[in-house]
Amino acid sequence: MKNVIVKYGVSGGLIVSVLFLGPVVFWPQSYMVVENMAKWEVVGYTVMVLSMLSVFFGTRAYRNELENSEFTFLKGLGIGLQITIFANIIFYFANVLLYEVLAPGFLIEFGEFYKAHLIESAPDETAKKLAAEEFDAQSGLLQNSYLYALVMAATTFFIGIIISLISAITLKRTKT
């Protein structure tokens, strides 16, 4: 059991880390283009979902190891959640590594860019002021890389929970 959890947890964690954070390292300037913002958001969520498919494949691999034994919903859910936790721990530390070591000023630079974008796209002065105030109220997230990494990992964790539930429902097997 441990081997399956480690194998699929590491693969899911590495997939989401490399595909999600790789572009920030290699093409950080592409995040600072207004036209690319929506595209990168879609890519980010797609990568999160695809990486969490390792939960399904790991749960299936564990069920197949049991051969003709019973594989209950709870057992499947437990395996899926363990793989999810393992993958998200890796993703959290990859985020911290990125934002603290590899690209330490990226979150602040991105925050300033995004604030300027919000202000520029506001229709009038009142809306511009309101956009700036709302951004400033929530900007603590972009100033704390550990908290931002936690939010990113929590988002992927939520996706992993959903895939764990789906896996447990679809892969359960009663004893024959």
Image (cartoon, rainbow, N blue to C red):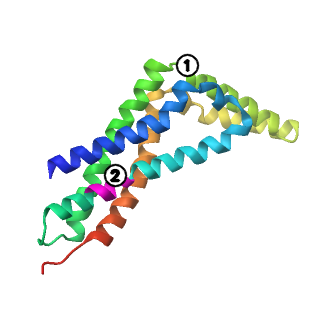
Work out whether residue 86 can be spotted: no
| Displayed quadrant of residue 173 | bottom left
The residue indicated by pointer 2 is 54
- SS at mark 1 in the image: loop
Looking at the picture, which amino acid does disc 1 mark? Gly
**Picture coordinates of residue 107 (x, y %)?**
56, 26
Q: Tell me the crowding category of disc 2: few under 14, some 14 to 19, or many 20 or more residues within 10 angstroms, Cα based.
A: many
Q: Position of residue 29 (x, y in %)?
A: 64, 25
Assess whether residue 57 is covered by the magenta stretch. yes
136 or 32: nearer the eye?
32
Q: Which residue is painted at 53% across and 33% down in the image?
A: 141
Depth order, front residue of 140/77: 77
Residue with the mark numbered 1 = 105
- Vertical position of residue 26 compared to residue 148: above or below: above
User: From what the image shows, is residue 74 above or below residue 113?
Assistant: below
Q: Nearer the viewer, residue 85 or 16?
A: 16
The stretch in magenta equals 53-58
